[in-house]
Every structure is written in C-alpha cells, then in structure tokens.
Image: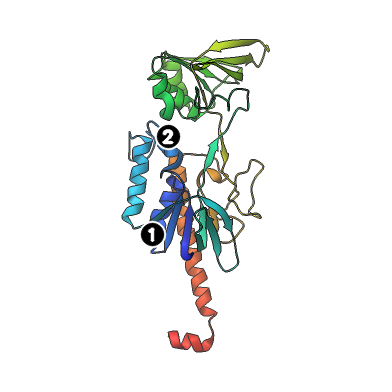
Amino acid sequence: MEEMYDIIIIGGGPGGLSAGIYAMRAALKTVLVERAAQGGQMTLSDEVDNYPGIEHITGMELAMKFSQHAQAYGLEMISDEVEEVDPGLEHHEVRLAGGRILKGHAIILATGGSPRKLGIPGEDEYYGKGVSYCAVCDGFFFKGKTVTVVGGGDTATEEALYLAKLAKQVYLVHRRDALRASKLLQKRVMDECKIEILWNTVATAIKADDQGVDRVDLEDTQSGEKRELPTDGAFIFVGFDPNNKLVPAGVKMNADGYVVTDEKCETNMPGIYVIGDLREKYARQIVVAAADGCTAALAAAHYVETKKASEVCELPQDLLAEIQ
C-alpha cells in the first residue's frame, strides 16, 4: 500500500507538531508519523515556565495544546514506527513497520534524541529498580526518600528541583566545580535546602539490594578518593544523543551525530529537512524546536510548490494544451 503526500513529518514533538501546523496552513497534503505519544520529550517536563505567552504549564498540557492545534487544521497522524527513509530523485519514501509505504515530495525529520547513559555497572541492570532518566515519570515512587541526581546542565538541575518537592534529600553529583545550567536554575538549586551538590565527583557504579538501588559508588575527580553514597534512587541526566538512525546515507552530520542544515533546516539532500534536537544548533529548547518546525515547513512548502510547477512545465506540449 503506497500513498503520496506533499510533506511527511517523522516525529511528534514540538518541532514536528509545529511543522504540521504550518504545513496544513500552506494547504499541503501532510502526514505526521509518531510511534509514541504526541509531544516527545516535552511531556516529561513537570513545569514549563519559559514558553513565550504561557507563564506556567506542565509539559504534558503544553504537548496536548500543540497536538490539538495541529489536529484543528486536520493534520493526518499515523501511530506507527518508521523503519526506513529512502530518498529518491522523483520523490522520497518512508517505510513503516506496519507495512505501509508513504511517498512524499519532502520529508521533515523530527526524531529528537535519547537520554545519554553513564555506561557504569548497575545502570542497565537496575533500570526501573531505582535507576531512572525521568524524574516526572518516577519521582512519585521516591516520596520521602533520598535520591541522587547525576549531571550539571539545565535538565539535571530542573529534575533535581522537581525531586526536591518529593524526596527528603537530593544529592546532585557533578564532575566539575561549576554547573552548566542557566544562572536562574543555578540560583534555585543553591537556594533549595534539600539539595546538596557534590562537586568534582563522578558516579562509578550503582548498587542495589533485594529492594532496589541502595547506594552509588562515587569518586572525587581531583583526589581520586572513593566512597559509597547511600541512596534510594539514581536519576541520570548527562545529555542526549541524537536519534539519527533514520537519517539517510549521504546526509551530512557532525562528529557528534547531529545533522548539519542550512538556515531553512534543509540538509544537503534536496527535500530532506531536519529539525529539533536532531539538528546541529546552539540551543535545545521547546521554543527553538517549534521555530525549527515553522521554518522547515515553510521551506518545504516552497520546495514542493516549485517542484510541482517544474513538473508541469516538463509535460509534453500536447498534454499542456489539454490542461490549459
């Protein structure tokens, strides 16, 4: 079963949904494919207070607003996993796990990224038994307990602050002597009495008993001193890796696996656009992903319209006469 679209969007995060809104406003036949819930990483945020025009909202609520807005324009959404993106000269193809093949003039990849792992003993073994990459998802289970957060960026500090609302004690383990988070978040962490920052420290192993995680092995990066930290849970926030497995061969990526695009979010392959956390850029925020979606959709719309006009001009003269 094959279907032809003007634009195929892969990924239903803020970037993909924003692209869907703008593509539908351009009156283009568009479909969005998402294997999980709409909203992407946005749904994992307990509170979003930096999206322009909305002072306070949960990530899940904002995701619902994005999705409802896109659906209000009649955007077609398919819940399935994409197995392969196959670029072509005439059109591009997207193969779904369910067997469908979607053809499109333009493709917008919005697959985001996945939590980066520490790669230490016990991390995989005790995942779901005290090891987590989502405080909003699992924080409730640690109410009144002691938890350890590993990381020093915006996500780590945000999640530590969230956990401080539930846990009795939060240890923030950071390998450097200064946080990488924004100044506002740093101040909030410093002012939170439940959070203790362990500077110049790395986690080397996560250990557990029959009940789940009960301690984390730590090492001082300066002195080399090792110690055990009793804890009921380990929350890891040390960055994300781009979900680039669907990026077609030949599309330019940087050394970290992020796709290189121009200001229109277009790759070096005509008709292939990349937005959100998969794209090489300076800031990774909801508002930036949404802006990427807008930019890519407008650029893709222009590309599709130009392509269609070119195809009409290439028709045989006798057929052109019939059309006219």
* Residue found at the far left of this picture: 72
Residue 324, label in figure = none
Going by the numbered disc 1, the residue's amino acid type is Met
Nearest to the eye among marks 2 and 1: give it: 2
Query: Can residue 184 be spotted in the picture?
Result: no
Which amino acid does the dot numbered 2 rest on? Leu
- Does 265 sit left or right of 38 as displayed? right
**Residue lying at 65% horizontally and 54% vertically, measured from the top left:** 249
SS class, disc 1: helix
Q: Position of residue 98 (x, y in %)?
A: 49, 54
Residue located beneath label 2 in the image: 44
Say whether disc 2 or disc 1 marks the residue closer to the N-terminus. 1
Seen from the viewer's position, the closer of residues 265 and 263 is 265
Quadrant of the snapshot with the C terminus: bottom left
| 205 w.r.t. 54: above or below | above
Instruction: Give percent across and percent down for residue 175.
Output: 60, 21
Query: Badge 1 is on which residue?
Result: 24
Residue situated in front as seen by the camera: 70 or 296:
70
Quadrant of the rendered structure where residue 29 is? bottom left
